[in-house]
Amino acid sequence: MAYIQILLFLVSSSLFQLFLGVNSATFTIVNECSYTVWPGILSGAGTAPLSTTGFALQPGGSYALEVPTSWSGRLWGRTLCAEDSNGKFTCVTGDCGSSGVECGGGGAQPPATLAEFTLNGAGGLDFYDVSLVDGYNLAMTVAPQGEGTGGNCTTTGCLTDLNPACPSELRVLASAEGVACRSACEAFGDPQYCCSGAYSTPDTCKPSSYSEFFKNACPKAYSYAYDDGTSTFTCASANYVVTFCPSPSTSVKSSDGLYPKAVEVSAGYRETTPRFNGLGVTLLAAIWVLRQLF
């Protein structure tokens, strides 16, 4: 009877995990910059924080982070960070206001390039984008890897260093050098740039010359609040590589050399099988045990 109880437990556990979709994704964060970057991570409302919310990543370094299914949140890079004589940790760009390396629930202070994720969302798809809506501080790409890459998954992001070409009225300086580029909303506070007030709908809020500066340089990144059609991508059951300062030789174009429309091109869903593998092994083991008992 003990064998049968163990067998039933294994089978029921596998079925329970199958129907709940218990799984996780791996985010590999890579720093190809010539300087240290301090990634910051913020989980969305109602989503548990990850095992870390901030750390240092040396040039050439990488960090693998396990992310549970159905997680949502954002990830960004902080630059020009230091600790003062009192132990207070701050960054010139992307600071999260925590006074420490761990952000602990604090978000990125603009301007900052953001990678945004909603895993296992509508239709079981992951939704992801790279956003310049809150400005730009460093180049970043998000690349799906693993099971999801057989579908219409697409690498997105911004390969270009925008800081040297940033319009003077948006430029953030440190030691007379451009280190970030503000959004027009942050720089001027005008509702037409912020998509607020009378400009709070897709019909009334249109691209500006400032958002077009971002869009022309980074065609697949969000440039303003209603830029969904060419900036939100989907994938099924993938892992993701987030790269700071990616090599310009790494193309983010599709195989036909064009920048596809995000949702229209990337919304394909491919049923994957890994979640069933554990159940299959358990059932085979169950059959073997039953044959031995009877």
Image (cartoon, rainbow, N blue to C red):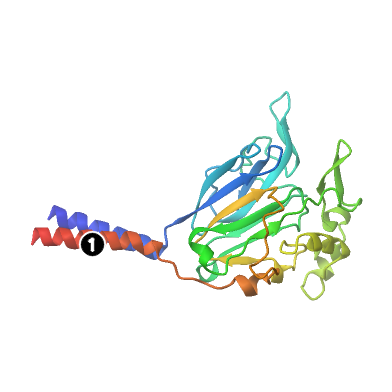
Location of the C terminus by quadrant is: bottom left
Q: For numbered disc 1, what is the local secondary structure?
A: helix
- The residue under the point 26% across, 59% down is 282
Q: Which residue appears farthest toward the left when viewing the image?
A: 294
- Position of 156 compared to 287: left or right? right
Q: Position of residue 178 (x, y in %)?
A: 85, 44
Residue behind mark 1: 284
Residue type pointed to by label 1: Leu
Visible in this render: residue 272? yes
**Any part of residue 105 in sight:** no
Q: Is residue 49 above or below residue 126?
A: above
> Label 1: how many residues lie within 10 Å, few (<14), some (14-19) or many (20+)?
few
Q: Residue furthest top?
A: 85
85 vs 184, left or right, is left
Q: Residue at x 79, y 76 (%)?
A: 203
User: To which quarter of the image does residue 115 belong?
Assistant: bottom right
Give the percent coordinates (x, y) of residue 149. Answer: 53, 63
Residue 289 higher or lower than 111, as above or below: below
Q: How many labels were placed on the picture?
A: 1
Q: Residue at x 68, y 64 (%)?
A: 253
Quarter of the image with the N terminus is: bottom left
Residue farthest to the right, as pictured: 168
Tell me where residue 3 appears, x and y as whole percent. Answer: 15, 54
Q: Position of residue 90 (x, y in %)?
A: 73, 35
